[in-house]
Image (cartoon, rainbow, N blue to C red):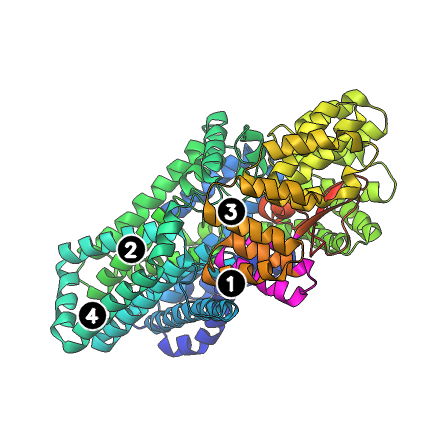
Amino acid sequence: MPSSGSRSAALRFPAVAVGIVYLYFFAGQYGGVNLAPLRLSSVLISAAVLLAFIVAGWRHERWRLRTRLWPAIAAVLAALVVTTVTSRNQRISLDFLGYAVLLAGLYLLLVALLRDDGMRRRIGVLMVGLTIAVCGWYLWDVISAWAAWWQMVGRVTLPSLRPEFDGLTFGNPGGVAAMAVLTGLSAAGHLTGSGRRGSVAAGVLAVVVVLVVLISGTRGAWVASGATAVVGAVLAAGLGGARAPLRAALARWQGRAAAGAGLLAALAGLAVLGPGIVSRVLNSGDGGRISYWLAAIRMFLAAPLTGVGPGMWAPERIRFTVAPEIDYYIGHAHNVYLNTAAELGLVGLAAGVAVVVVAGRLVIEALRGREAVRRRWAIVAVLGATYFGVHQLFDVFVGVPGALFVFAVPFAFLDATALDTGVEGEPAVAPRRGLLAGTLSLAVVLTVAWTGWNERPALQFADGEAAAAAGDWTTAAADSKAAAQADPSMAPYRLMTGLGALHEGQSGTADLEAAAALDDMPNAWLNLAFVDVEAGDRAGATTALNAAMRLGDQQPALLVPAGVVAERLGETNQADRWFASALGAIPRIAAATSFWEDPARSSRWPSIAAAAAGSMAPEAQVDFWLSAGDIARARSAAATIADAAARNVSQLAIGAWEGDGKSWDELEALASQQPRDVTIVGWCARLAARQGEMVRALDYRIWLETIEPYSSTLGLEVKITDQLAPGGGIAGANWGIYGIYTYRRPTAADLLAPGLPHLVWSIGS
């Protein structure tokens, strides 16, 4: 490879390394995408860097904007422009178009950096360091969680995968797995070019990455890793250049030792983690993926040519969901191909094909070429594309800039070295310098102007949400109103403005109606129904209530307030059905005796309770009747449990509930004997809190979270109140992630009008 300014690369590298680390762990991950201050900072930094890069390209040939992939980049940006014009909400889609411009510019900058052989080596070393960092950090967190759990259990036993759902800064364990694999592939690409020691180091690093993938408990990562291994084996068998290093490595005792150690580590990992892996594969996850896929297909069928618009799957998801499909707020369709079809239609799919064709040609040329280093990086690119493509059958990472960066590194390496050397005698391919530089400069300036303008209300809205969470609705109302006036197409701004007005004793009808029209959120409709019924508008309240409950009895936190609105409309039969459904989903709601003994429904409680209990399994009936204070019925329900072990657990829980120390001791002993049983541990958490042992109750909730993410609520009680207290959490709802996953703008936990009943988590009775 020709050397071009390696000394200057040494001077530039610290700044490059800081930028990459910032992108890798912060700007390009969960917080950087979803939190307005960090998002705005990243856009401004990216724009400043790109404009400096463009100016440097005018002055020095070394920094000219050149890439072999420009047809693919042009196709993607053109598709985004077309689909933004036809979007159902151009305001939101313009954000994504702007981000795409910045990412395209950053890719061109990466290619320019990698044209220097000194920078290539240093970035290769950085990829090794990042792989070690992410894997080491994750393993440290996991082992620490397991160690704390073993201490609570009182012995070392089989641990659970993905303890506490730890995702580092990447948002979830699947993100950790994807970053580890993609970064590890580039690290391997660098190390295997460093001789025997490098190959051994790459093998050791591969074992660590595989361990991280296993522990992450991510089915998409498991399937993708398996597919990547198969493709790697095919490449090794089919490419002479790949077979020779493998044979050479295995011919030495160090290579054989590394291979043997890797095999033993893999077998040991399977032996320890195998049961958890089998359980994870057989578990259906959140149950929503099929619903998300169906919603995406309906969006595509509704607008097959251009889709619903960039970034619009999440806001439109509820409109294209039908009962009884799950109503759950999530940022994407959990399948990049369906997500693309839904948002960009055939235009977007065609752009995707263009990317595959153009990038594939670059890779094939390198595989067929004479340079060993380019063949090696072509193999890395193929393996990375395999992993990225298969994992995104179950997930979507194209909206995660950090993941896009590590995916792009091997392609940028091939792109940069092709520009340096030419391929098969062809000249480097690039559009006219002035046209590309001028277009990119204008696009960057427009993106910064657009983003800066729209992030101002986002920053103010974030302040308002913090105030709402602290119970300061006066500040929240003012900040939300200012954000909504500046950016009226953002549904969360309108929803919170309407709620703020209600908290201030004013009418929030107009903003609630606007929010409901923008994204059909059930809470907006339910709040409207409450406002209308209070104002005596029965027809309006009925229409809004039906819209709020269109997807059926899914969220207890909606069912109970919907039941109250139905009561005020005189629809007591419907109210009782919703109350019974809420109790069936969360039997502990029965403990809210002040709500059920209210004169408005006390006479109906026996029939509500009977309907709720009739829908429950006997184990849930035990919980229900204990919460309702009816020990006799709880014992009767426990006696009907067919499984002897489950019956024993319920009977011990009843005894401990009544204060029997022997039953409590036996239940705790069972938890130690069966530490992965969330039912037993959940009872221990609740009963410890009931006995006033709050530290022990907290330990049990941590125990629950270690063995099954989000299960710590099994150790909590539920109360019903007219308004959420500062710092409280809503029980039986999924709207806590509504704003951040749908619009990248976090919303407060309280999305119900004051006066409507709120289901809130409570520690102890």
Upstream in the sequence, badge 1 or badge 3?
3
Q: Amino acid at mark 4?
A: Gly
Looking at the image, residue 550 sits to the left or right of residue 344; the answer is right
Query: How many residues crowd mark 1 within 10 Å: few (<14), some (14–19), many (20+)?
Result: some
Looking at the image, residue 640 sits to the left or right of residue 578; the answer is left
Q: Which residue is mark 4?
A: 260
The residue depicted at 42 percent of the width and 54 percent of the height is 433
Q: CA distance from mark 1 to mark 3?
A: 16 Å
- Residue 669's label in the rendered image is 1
Residue 594, x across and y down, in percent: 80, 42
Q: Amino acid at mark 1?
A: Ala
Q: Which residue is mark 3?
A: 647
Residue 320, image quadrant: top right
**Pointers 1 and 3 in contact (CB under 8 A)?**
no
**Pointers 4 and 3 in contact (CB under 8 A)?**
no
Upstream in the sequence, badge 1 or badge 2?
2
Upstream in the sequence, badge 1 or badge 4?
4
Q: Amino acid at mark 2?
A: Leu
The residue depicted at 50 percent of the width and 43 percent of the height is 332
- Residue 383's label in the rendered image is 2
Split into 4 quadrants, where in the image is the C terminus? bottom right
Q: CA distance from mark 1 to mark 2?
A: 48 Å
Q: CA distance from mark 3 to mark 2?
A: 51 Å
Q: CA distance from mark 2 to mark 4?
A: 23 Å
The residue depicted at 38 percent of the width and 43 percent of the height is 393
Residue 493, x across and y down, in percent: 71, 44
